[in-house]
Amino acid sequence: RKNIMTPFSISRFSLTVLLIALSTTISWAQEPDHLSMTMHFKDSTVFVEETYQSNQKINRDSIYFLLNPGFELDTIKSKDLASYKITQKPGMPLPFYHLAFNESRDISEILAVTFKYSIDLSEQNHMKSDWIELNADKLWFPNLGALNNEFTYDVTITDFPESYYLITHTDAKVTREKNTLTIKKDNPWYEVLILAGKDMKEWEYDPNITLIGKQEIADSTFQAIGKKVANSIDLLNGSFGMSDPITSFKVLLRNTSRDEIGFQFNRRDMIVTGTDFNDYGNLSHEIAHYWWSKANFIQEPWMNESFANYGMYRVLKEFDAEDYQRVLARNRERSENAIPVAEASLFVADSYNSYYHKGAIHLIDLEAKIGSESMQVLLSSCVEKGIHTTEGFLLELEKQTNKETREFFEGLLKI
């Protein structure tokens, strides 16, 4: 248990830019889309210019980009671009920029769209709490067509505040030369991750678990969170992670409070949370996303959230039985009047309790029917085979058990 004071170290800095590509009018190409971005910090303002490049052939004369309407766009540029305006895309209750192109546009050419704008961090982010967080939840950056479109990226940052500690994707390559940072990710993903906190330090729980948080955080708090994370990982590795176990993990404790930002999130082998999320329920849910975060989170969010909650229940039952009973009773009550899980998607009204809680209750009821050992074999097999759809899960359930059990669970999803 070491307390390590760290200097400005780019490979671990923390700032979030969640950028995603969307378009129902495009066909997949072998080469992934790519985002090139430059960010220049000056006082509390960051000036942004980025080019989104797609090798996909656009079959229509228009495309959509999702952008935060809370800041003023300077320019959008693209070859043969005729006009752009804010509109609403069918099926997506979010403000989109609709880009219309001249009829002469050659769809065989690579699409490149450049965006230029600035963000006042003192007004639209958390500079006042010594924290910078740029992410898709606030739609800072343009997103082309469907929220889970993957792309590679490179980001160049100049004059980043030296007292801030940066974190990005753990598999991204980060370099620094004088006052310039470069982040490059060659493995396609659906976001750019940039987070940063002021006066941060690293605290090593064990050789495989590192916590990052503000220097004033007491060692006892780091220790308490680290213990819950370690226990959760050990149990979940042995439950359904046998085919894809966590080997090393990071916990980022941002400076903002739970009241300021009422959520935490995972990024595969890292969770971004806070000291006031210090309980088994909160931490284990995010850790469980390591295995359950690859389903289409628009169409089948229950395949992510309910499965993560099921993992949370397993951890609570083992390490906090009293809280397990309390949380389970509360979430059963929340599920009673929720819409059927089979009908729940991200943009369906009043579906949160369905895809977040009701699906997890169904999984508990399934375990009661087939037994914990069979449930463990089933879920580990789903992880090993990369099953991320409802139909895929039902097929695997039938294979591991029988048709009657599949029909039982399929019936639960429809009520």
Image (cartoon, helix red, strand yellow):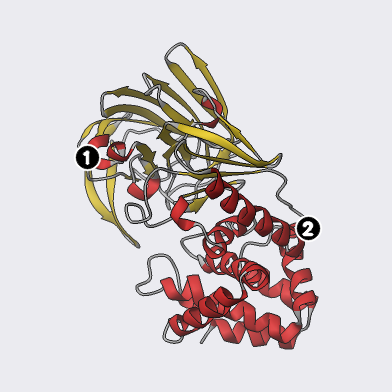
| Mark 2 residue element | loop
Which of the two residues, 170 or 95, is positioned nearer the viewer here? 170
Instruction: Decide which of tag 1 and tag 2 comes sooner along the chain.
Output: 1
Where 407 falls versus 7 (above or below)? below
Neighbor class of circle 1 (other Cα within 10 Å; few <14, some 14-19, many 20+) is: few
Q: Residue at x 34, y 36 (%)?
A: 130
| Amino acid type assigned to the residue bearing label 1 in the image | Glu
Q: Which residue position holds label 1?
A: 123
Give x and y (percent) for residue 367.
70, 80
Q: Which residue position holds label 2?
A: 242
| Mark 1 residue element | helix
Mark 1 vs mark 2, CA separation in Å:
45 Å
Which of the two residues, 220 or 260, is positioned nearer the viewer here? 220
| Amino acid type assigned to the residue bearing label 2 in the image | Met
Q: Residue at x 57, y 56 (%)?
A: 293
Where 362 falls versus 126 (above or below)? below
Q: Residue at x 67, y 82 (%)?
A: 366
Give x and y (percent) for residue 183.
51, 26
